[in-house]
Amino acid sequence: MSTTSKTATVIRHIHFEDLGIFAQPLIDQGYAVAYHDVGLSDDDRLDLLSPDLLVVLGGPIGVYEVEAYPFMSGTIAQLRQRLAENRPTLGICLGAQLMAAALDAEVGPMGHKEIGFGELTLTEDGAKGPLRHIVGQPVLHWHGDAFQIPEGAANLATTALCGTQAFSRGHNLLALQFHPEVDIAAGIERWLIGHASELAGAKIDPRALRAEAQKIGSTTRAAGQAMLTQWLEGLQA
């Protein structure tokens, strides 16, 4: 366990989409974690450039909706500078899409929803890195948008419904379309309640998701934490 204090800023767009099982590995690696809740804090003074690590979490909006949600233009602008400097950055779902947009890759609706649990198929690049820990593990998918792979980045994983599930650029930039951070055993009910309208619109029965989550239980926790720990240990100054 590291005793060195490093700063990690976590951008949270909706309260129940938090670090989940990723919180403990960050603490174990010596990070002092501070959440910034978009819309509840002083967004104009938000500094995405100075933290040792930036984590951008998910949310139920699209990166192309900048007129409806103006804060995203500022987020993308700061991300563009941070990523250009190769500063350690992790994006999950919307966070990954924001990273892609900052790297000038296209992000848009897939034309269908991918909501539920399923395994990833890793690419050759994906199998060489931290995602190898989650091979064979069902992960939570919850999105209707997808990113294209930015120039100079590696596509790490696919599913039948989405061919771009993760990308990396070097050791310091990692973007995940899926949700390995969710505490499936303890936290799935918050998702079912918080996204009830989306589930209804997609004609997905929350009882089916709840039952699947109960079967999976906590089996994915160790794999997800091992994935994050390997990535954190491989960060380069």
Image: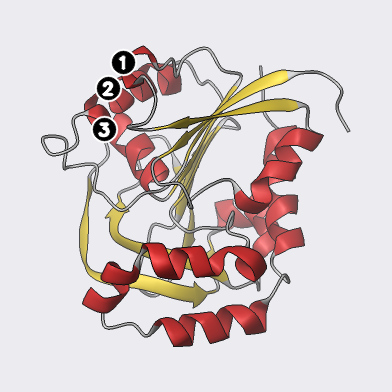
- Mark 2 neighbour class, 10 Å CA radius: few under 14, some 14 to 19, many 20 or more: some
Give the Cα distance between marks 3 and 2.
15 Å
Taking the image as shown, residue 68 lies to the left or right of residue 234, namely left
Q: Label 1 to label 2, Cα distance in Å? A: 8 Å
Residue at the left extreme of this rendering: 67
Locate residue 195 relative to residue 201 in the image: left or right: right
- Disc 1 + disc 2, Cβ < 8 Å: yes
Residue 218 location (% of width, % of height): 72, 70
In what quadrant of the picture does the C terminus appear? top right
Where does label 1 land, which residue?
44
The residue at which mark 3 appears reads as 104
Mark 1: amino acid:
Asp
Q: Where on the picture, by quarter, is residue 171?
A: top right
Amino acid type at image mark 3: Asp
Which badge, 3 or 2, is on the more N-terminal residue? Answer: 2
Q: How many marks?
A: 3
For the residue carrying disc 1, how many other residues have a C-alpha within 10 Å: few (<14), some (14-19), or many (20+)? few
Residue located at (75% from left, 34% from top): 27
Q: Which tag is nearer the camera, tag 3 or tag 2?
A: 2
Tell me the residue at 58%/63% (across/down).
Answer: 187
Residue 135: assigned label: none
Element at badge 1?
helix
Which residue position holds label 2?
A: 74
Q: Is residue 231 left or right of residue 18?
A: right
Bin the neighbour count of mark 3 within 10 Å (Cα to Cα): few under 14, some 14-19, many 20 and up. Answer: some
N-term-proximal mark, 1 vs 2 = 1
Between the residue at mark 3 and the residue at mark 1, the CA separation in whole angstroms equals: 23 Å
